[in-house]
Image (spheres, grey):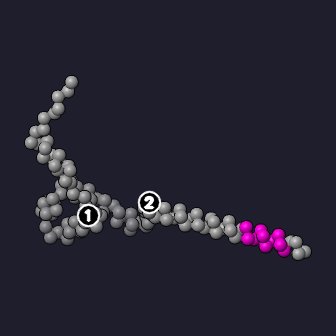
Amino acid sequence: MKTPKKKTAENFIKDIRRNTRRIFSSEQKIQIVMEALRAEMSVAELCRKYSINESQFYKWNKEFLEAGKKRLAGDVTREATSDEVSELKKENQSLKVMIADLVLRYDIVKKSLDMLD
């Protein structure tokens, strides 16, 4: 039988940090990277200001620059969000129904014209 693992103060603090981790929006990440590009303060100061790790900042910075490089190179493809995909699927289904209705109407008109001849 296993005995429950004792929580040390260090583990307790790590758990609190894990559970209260801040989630930054893409706009916030861009703002932080742009602030660093203005070079008004060092990266270390900026990271302290926003309570982020320097490695996290450099990851955001690299992603930001790579996205800009792709865009400038003409790579304008992007991944659609799930909302966009579901909206396109609904529109596609609606268009299919409209086409089916038009084909049926066409067949009816064609048959009625054939009967007149």
Tally of marks: 2
Secondary structure of residue under mark 1: helix
Report the residue marked by disc 2.
Answer: 82
Magenta segment: does it hold 106? yes
Q: Position of residue 52 (x, y in %)?
A: 18, 57
**What range of the chain is rendered magenta?**
104-113
Q: CA distance from mark 2 to mark 1?
A: 22 Å
Report the residue marked by disc 1.
Answer: 29
Name which quarter of the figure residue 71 lies in: bottom left
Q: Position of residue 93 (x, y in %)?
A: 58, 63
- In this picture, residue 105 sits left or right of residue 11: right
Of the residues tagged 2 and 1, which is closer to the observer? Answer: 2
- Residue at the (75%, 71%) spot, across then down: 106
Task: Residue type at mark 2: give it.
Answer: Ser
- Residue at the (20%, 50%) spot, across then down: 19
Is any atom of residue 43 visible in this view? Answer: no
Nearer the observer, 26 or 112: 112
Task: Residue type at mark 1: give it.
Answer: Lys
Up-down: is 5 above or below 20?
Answer: above
Q: Position of residue 98 (x, y in %)?
A: 64, 69
- In this picture, residue 69 sits left or right of residue 20: right
